[in-house]
Image (cartoon, helix red, strand yellow):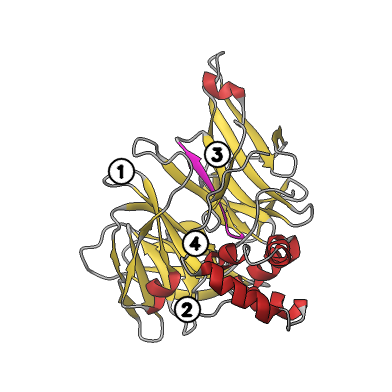
Amino acid sequence: MEETKSNPQTHPNDQSRNTKIRRKSHHLPEEIIAEILARLPVRSLLRFRCVSQSWRRLISSRHFCDAHLQISSKDPNFSRRRAIATVLLPFYTLKQCSLHSLLLGPAADAADLDYPMKNPRNSIRVVGCCNGLVCIAVNGKHFFLWNPSTKRHKKLADADDRMKSGLFITKYGFGFDETNDDYKVLGILSGFCNSGRYESVVKIYSLRRDSWKVIDAFKDGLPFDDNGKFVSGKLHWGRRFGMESKWDIVCLDLGSESCVSVNQPSYLDGGFIPSLGVIWGSLCVMCDFPKVSVDVWVLKDSWMKLVVLPYFDDPWKGPYSTPLCIGGKGEILLVYGSAFIVYNPKQASFRRPKITNIGTFLEADVYVESLVPLDGY
């Protein structure tokens, strides 16, 4: 399996510091050392792999990576989570900024990301984020699995050689199949083939097999949304079908690779525009009543209405998009048009975080810093 990596930066005093750490660590049981290290950021852990062979084996082990991921995912200060945005102007690129700064700080700084096939002439889309891995699509046809924290990435094989004759991936999704311990990418290829007929083919990529295969899914209608929302081993899409363009929620179980419909919330009557999102690991539906309000429903054991977002008059452009997270005091971070906003439901107030080094962006998602590898599956 091909994989690209870059060496972490080292500090001039790392050698002497590592010698002191190695001496002190001899007095601690290995399980205590592992417990301490699992609470450190990825950047430090990449450097500490050079302390000793035992530390390298520990930090590189699957058990340690999983433990570190669990701790980072539950960090109440959001210091290990990053918002990643697809920036459109002045050219396509990906940028990231601290979730902690967006939610709690007075200002945030967006940093450039060095992603695969980075080029101002290449379009870039985020397919999804899961366990610190980010799936990206370059020019709509080159797919990569990429860990921004470790700088490792893997290029996926083309989904279909017939893409050259008119079939392209138009809908996609990315998530983790816990049943089979496997990361998977789903692509729906659609277009006019050489015979002039419009075709659609559903394929799924397995990191463990390192290959695509055709699956028999969505026989009663293709998804409406372009990217699936990953929650609890399933990819979810919104879908419109029938003479009345009825909207429903359909999901694909990554373990069984079968589709089922999902019960919807008890909506109020009236015209609204629904959309799907994920907030803190739960599926949510945003019911947009244009220029009135947006109801946000969250699926736990059952559907519950989380909050009603009021509309407000200001020069910002675009509708509400998706909620990204909920802060410790109940604040909700959302994408609004091409901006991040924080809504405080207790005070019924909005705040727009100040962000430097970012322009107009198309979409945003959240990933957690992790050591999750792209090999060993």
Identify the residue at image location x=60%, y=49%. 174
| Residue type pointed to by label 3 | Phe
Q: Is residue 34 left or right of residue 128?
A: right
Q: Position of residue 306 (x, y in %)?
A: 51, 75
Q: Nearer the viewer, residue 28 or 102?
A: 28
Identify the residue at image location x=55%, y=19%. 193
Whether 141 is among the magenta residues is no
Circle 2 crowding by C-alpha within 10 Å: few under 14, some 14–19, many from 20:
some
| Disc nearer the start of the sequence (2/3) | 3
Numbered tag placed on residue 143 in the rendering: 3
The vertical placement of 319 against 241, above or below, is below
Numbered tag placed on residue 101 in the rendering: none
Q: Which residue was labeled with disc 1?
A: 91
| Disc nearer the start of the sequence (3/1) | 1
How far separated are the C-alphas under marks 3 and 1?
A: 20 Å
The magenta segment is: 131-138
